[in-house]
Image (cartoon, rainbow, N blue to C red):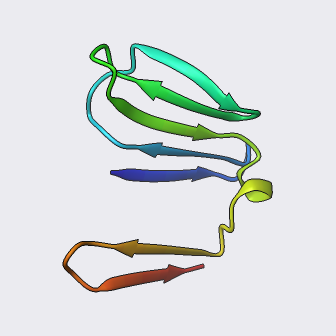
Amino acid sequence: MKIAYYPETDSMYIDLSAKASADSREVSPGVVIDYAANGDIVGIDIDNASTKLDLKEIVLKSIPADTQTIAA
């Protein structure tokens, strides 16, 4: 998984898979889900991310590993 934030456009892309996107659907205003040809979710695009998300902190949690926090 890769998370990229683009401050010049205030957008965030969460890349969930190396599979190519074959279809995209806007699920709420400014939030688009990308799907592979087989229907798997491969990415999430979020416009105006700073108004929809708390970008000051990202918490990564692996099961069964410990929680990790990355703060800006």
At 75% across and 58% down in the image, what residue appears?
A: 50
Relative to 7, is 34 above or below?
above
Give x and y (percent) for residue 37: 31, 13
Quadrant in the picture for the C terminus: bottom right
At 77% across and 46% down in the image, what residue appears?
A: 48
Relative to 9, is 21 above or below?
above
Total numbered labels:
0
Q: Quadrant of residue 32?
A: top right
Quick check: 57 left or right of 38?
right
Give x and y (percent) for residue 59: 47, 75
**Residue most extreme to the right:** 51
Relative to 61, is 44 above or below?
above
Quick check: 29 left or right of 45?
right
Q: Nearer the viewer, residue 27 or 30?
A: 27
At 65% across and 67% down in the image, what residue appears?
A: 55
Give x and y (percent) for residue 65: 21, 81
Quick check: 5 left or right of 67?
right
Quick check: 44 left or right of 61?
right
Give x and y (percent) for residue 67: 35, 83
At 44% across and 36% down in the image, what residue appears?
A: 43
